[in-house]
């Protein structure tokens, strides 16, 4: 039998998809996104042995996926999706870098339920007001859903593994989503420091019509610091409220967020911070423009632990599937904060390191194609 490596196997599946679709495959669809840009990034306070500026080409979550369904009768369908990220520039040396949204489940009059690896409902609450996605350096998720200290567990921009999710049907514009994820690891019987009982709960409730979109999201990470020396059972949590007004060819959106997190293994209580984001976009002809401003407040009342970021973009649609765009973004940390671009830059800033108070910027030209 012919032996295929992982890349050849996935290429084989992609090439075979049209033929497979003609068979009894349950309406299999092959889809994907090719997305790369040339960036010039700068950091005025890099860590040791890092340059203050860098030119690079980045693959922005380029991915390939397969999805479909099978009609089981009585308004019930089996659903499935398999999606993998592809490093278009081969910077990391691994063609398919990681598993993206992938699941298997059932869909019917009761709603949708599935198991898999999937974005949490909380993460997706801002999808309709997010101008750059979740991995681009100009994304507002550099600040929203995160804190600028080295916790390692305090990100709420999560594609959650080991998850079960339930989505209600859409009732005249209303829909709710609920997700639960156990840790899938052996639990400690002695102390939080040796394992705890980690789990994640996430939910959202949304309403949308022709002129308005509004949603509320909540997420909790139980025993967030378990296994890193904490002897106290603490829960990181996040609340987010979003409203957007839609008009002909444009939209304006506002986000408010409050995060409460344990910031170190020695924490006995959580610390909170507020944040907000304002964004807008408008299209005219084949062109579109967008801008966002995001602000994170001080954490736990500690002065100068906040940050702000603004991003600008101009895009031109060469076709319905292909866009070329330019962008500029600047992230400014207060003197005791270390927020970083979500896609990384010339420095990975951590609390207590030289990156505190860093000013980061990025300028670039990108191309994206959807199929």
Image (tube, grey):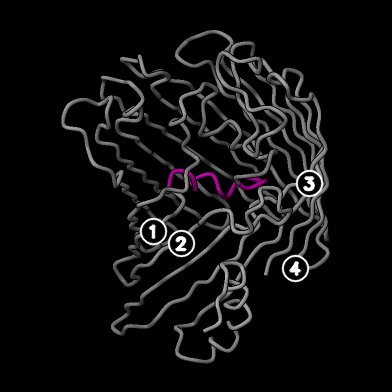
Please indicate whether residue 16 sits to the left or right of residue 227 in the image.
right
Q: Name the residue tied to disc 4.
A: 320
The answer to whether residue 202 is above or below residue 233 is below
- Residue drawn at point x = 31 percent, y = 85 percent: 73
User: Contact (CB < 8 A) between labels 1 and 2?
Assistant: yes
Q: CA distance from mark 2 to mark 4?
A: 26 Å
Q: At which x and y percent is residue 224?
A: 35, 30
- Residue drawn at point x = 79 percent, y = 28 percent: 42
Tell me if residue 331 is in the magenta stretch.
no
Q: Name the residue tied to disc 3.
A: 57
Give whichever of discs 4 and 1 has the lower sequence position: 1
Q: For numbered disc 1, what is the local secondary structure?
A: strand
Q: CA distance from mark 4 to mark 1?
A: 31 Å
Magenta segment, principal secondary structure? loop
Query: Magenta segment, which residues?
Result: 121-133
Give whichever of discs 4 and 3 has the lower sequence position: 3
The answer to whether residue 1 is above or below residue 227 is below
Give whichever of discs 3 and 1 has the lower sequence position: 3
Q: Nearer the viewer, mark 2 or mark 4?
A: 2
Check disc 3: other Cα within 10 Å, few if <14, some if 14-19, many if 20+. Answer: some
Q: CA distance from mark 2 to mark 3?
A: 27 Å
Q: CA distance from mark 1 to mark 2?
A: 6 Å
Give whichever of discs 2 and 3 has the lower sequence position: 3
Q: Nearer the viewer, mark 4 or mark 3?
A: 3
What mark, if any, has residue 102 been given in the picture? Answer: 2
């Amino acid at each position: 039998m012919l032996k295929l490596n992982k890349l050849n196997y996935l290429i084989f599946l992609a090439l075979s998809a049209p033929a497979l679709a003609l068979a009894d495959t349950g309406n299999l669809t092959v889809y994907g996104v090719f997305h790369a840009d040339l960036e010039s990034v700068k950091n005025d306070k890099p860590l040791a042995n890092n340059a203050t500026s860098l030119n690079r080409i980045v693959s922005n979550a380029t991915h390939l996926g397969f999805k479909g369904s099978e009609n089981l009768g009585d308004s019930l369908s089996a659903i499935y999706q398999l999606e993998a990220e592809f490093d278009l520039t081969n910077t990391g040396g691994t063609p398919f870098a990681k598993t993206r949204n992938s699941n298997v489940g059932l869909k019917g009059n009761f709603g949708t339920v599935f198991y898999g690896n999937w974005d949490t409902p909380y993460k997706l609450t801002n999808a309709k007001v997010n101008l750059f996605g979740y991995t681009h350096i100009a994304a507002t998720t550099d600040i929203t859903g995160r804190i600028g200290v080295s916790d390692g567990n305090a990100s709420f921009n999560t594609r959650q593994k080991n998850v079960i999710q339930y989505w209600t049907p859409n009732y005249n514009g209303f829909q709710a989503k609920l997700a639960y994820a156990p840790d899938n690891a052996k639990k400690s019987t002695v102390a939080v420091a040796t394992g705890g009982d980690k789990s994640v709960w996430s939910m959202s409730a949304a309403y949308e019509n022709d002129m308005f979109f509004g949603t509320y999201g909540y997420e909790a990470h139980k025993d967030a610091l378990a296994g890193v020396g904490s002897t106290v059972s603490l829960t990181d949590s996040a609340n987010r409220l979003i409203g957007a007004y839609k008009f002909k060819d444009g939209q304006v959106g506002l986000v408010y967020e409050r995060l409460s997190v344990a910031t170190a293994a020695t924490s006995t209580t959580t610390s909170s911070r507020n944040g907000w984001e304002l964004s807008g976009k408008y299209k005219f002809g084949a062109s579109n423009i967008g801008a966002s401003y995001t602000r994170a407040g001080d954490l736990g009342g500690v002065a100068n632990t906040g940050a702000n970021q603004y991003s600008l973009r101009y895009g031109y649609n060469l076709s319905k599937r292909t866009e070329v765009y330019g962008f500029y973004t600047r992230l400014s940390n207060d003197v005791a904060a270390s927020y970083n671009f979500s896609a990384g830059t010339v420095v990975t800033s951590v609390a207590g390191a030289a990156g505190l108070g860093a000013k980061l910027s990025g300028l670039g030209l990108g191309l994206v194609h959807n199929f």
